[in-house]
Amino acid sequence: MRTKMELGILACTTIWLISCLVIGVVGDIGVMNSSSTVAEATAGLLSYQYYETSCPQVESIVTDKVALILLSDPASSAALLRLLFHDCQVQMSSSKNFAIRNRETMGIIKTMVDSVCPGTVSCSDILVLAARDAVAMSGGPKIKVPLGRKDSNSSSHTFADASLPAANTGVSEILSIFTKRGMTVEESVAILGSHTLGVSHCVNIMDRSSRQIIRANRTPFETLLALRCAFGPSFSNSGTVGNDVTISKFDNQYYKDTSRGRGLLKIDSDMSMDPRTAPIVERFAQNQNEFFKEFTAAFLKLTSANVLTGHQGVVRTKCNAVN
């Protein structure tokens, strides 16, 4: 059984999710640079039968491995989902990549797939499959995903770091980012539900937890955060707070907590009060199936838009390095 401190390095935060949308899906393994002249919409080039003849076992191989991972460490679901939202396979030295786990796991799965289908399946597709399996095995929806993504043959450390939004990003900016990816407001609120897994680092909630305790309008939850994340000379990134009370289960608890004034990050709190998003938060809090339906649609858009396909990319030999 893992302690809370051990779970602390998961940190599957909304900030990382948003960064994926700014930089592009599946990080620098298989996404077009923002300056690419390749058409934005590539979803039509993906296929549910892409590996039907070249590697029909790929989905079962990935699923079996993810099942073993979660059996030994249920909290790894958050790490795998975070890897999808901000892939750091090449940029692992970046300061923004603090505590991303299971990068080595991707290499193991890649090796297993290549032992059956050498040089056929991209790291990008493996990552999407692993993340969707992690969601399903943690209690979330079972999502059928199209495949055929290719990996990039370059990395952009500077571009990735410069693209990360601030921790105090507001609702309007968040909705703008998601809208540019073709998402509705409902889907935007749903994809933020990925926050239901894992924990967040105290450094990402400084604006809420470091306020003076004597402040008259401080909420009980903000006081709790201040006690959990004591900022001072000894402060470090190791401090964490659970994103909701069921950190290893993919459910609608995140929306229940947020609707009750217990949103962890600023965007969580703001989303429960903004007239554009508050009714959706409440609806998801009351109806988990509705959340799952919208999350599925958002996940498919997120993982299918703006990706490399065909001759635009390559199939990497190793997921943590360019060919």
Image: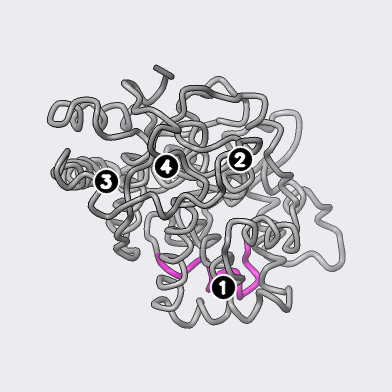
User: Dot 1 lies on which element?
Assistant: helix
- Whether 87 is among the magenta residues is no
Q: Nearer the viewer, mark 4 or mark 1?
A: 1
N-terminal label among 1 and 3: 3
Pointer 1 residue: 186
Residue 95: give x, y in percent of width and height: 62, 25
Residue to which mark 3 is pinned: 70
Q: Secondary structure at mark 2?
A: helix
Which kind of residue does numbered mark 2 sit on? Ile
Q: Which residue is depicted at the point 27% across and 55% down?
A: 48
How far from the left and from the top, in percent, is residue 86?
52, 39
Q: Earlier in the sequence, mark 3 or mark 2?
A: 2
Mark nearer the viewer, 1 or 3:
1
Q: Give the residue at mark 2.
A: 23
Which residue position is annotated with label 4?
79
Q: Earlier in the sequence, mark 4 or mark 1?
A: 4
Mark 1 surroundings within 10 Å by alpha-carbon count, few (fewer than 14), some (14 through 19), many (20 or more):
many
Q: Nearer the viewer, mark 3 or mark 2?
A: 2
Q: CA distance from mark 1 to mark 2?
A: 22 Å
Q: Position of residue 183 (x, y in %)?
A: 57, 64
